[in-house]
Image: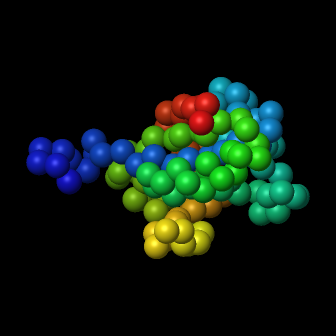
Amino acid sequence: MEFGQSLSTQTVIIYKAPQKGKGQKLLKEGFQPVDFPYNPPYLDGSCYFAGPNDRSIAEEFNQSYKEGILEVSIDQVSYEQDFKSLEYRYDEKSDCERIEVVIPQSLFPILNQFPRVLKPR
């Protein structure tokens, strides 16, 4: 942590490669249960993100979906409180453990409070 920077001003960014046709909808309307039904490809109704500050998983999915990458910026305190416990080990690549964050529908209202931006790549 840099000198003079408090936890509340630190930001955690998580990344989502939206499915084909969903990028602008998620950007404008946020995450809605109707977009993550309890059937394939979601099964559990959850929204899957590439973990904090590592876009690589989202970039891999974006090669298929080609919708860009949705970035959600969450302040450190809120992330620790609401989302940290939802981190799971995805895999390892280049000797780096990659983390995914699996956010259930019950937390979509909290998730939607944070700013989102859709980047072309």
Q: Answer above or below: position of 65 versus 118.
A: below
Q: Which quarter of the figure has residue 38?
A: bottom right
Q: Can you name the residue that lies furthest to the left here?
A: 3
Q: Quarter of the image containing the N terminus?
A: bottom left
- Residue sitting at 44 percent across and 51 percent down? 53
Q: Between residue 64 and residue 115, name the one nearer to us.
A: 64
Q: Quadrant of the C terminus?
A: top right
Q: Position of residue 29 (x, y in %)?
A: 68, 30
Image spot of residue 36 (x, y percent): 78, 49
The x and y percentages for residue 97 are 48, 71
Kindly give the residue lying farthest to the front in the view shown: 94
Looking at the picture, the colour scheme in use is rainbow
Relative to residue 80, is residue 32 drawn left or right? right
Q: Furthest-right residue in view?
A: 39
Q: Which quadrant of the view contains residue 103?
A: bottom right
Residue at horizontal 35 percent and vertical 51 percent from the top? 76
Q: Nearer the viewer, residue 16 or 26?
A: 16
Residue 87 visible, this angle? no
In the image: residue 39, left or right of residue 88: right
Residue 101 at x, y percent in the picture: 57, 60
Residue 1 in view, yes or no: yes
The residue drawn where x is 82% and y is 62% is: 43
Q: Residue at coordinates 54% horizontally, 72% vertically from top-left? A: 92
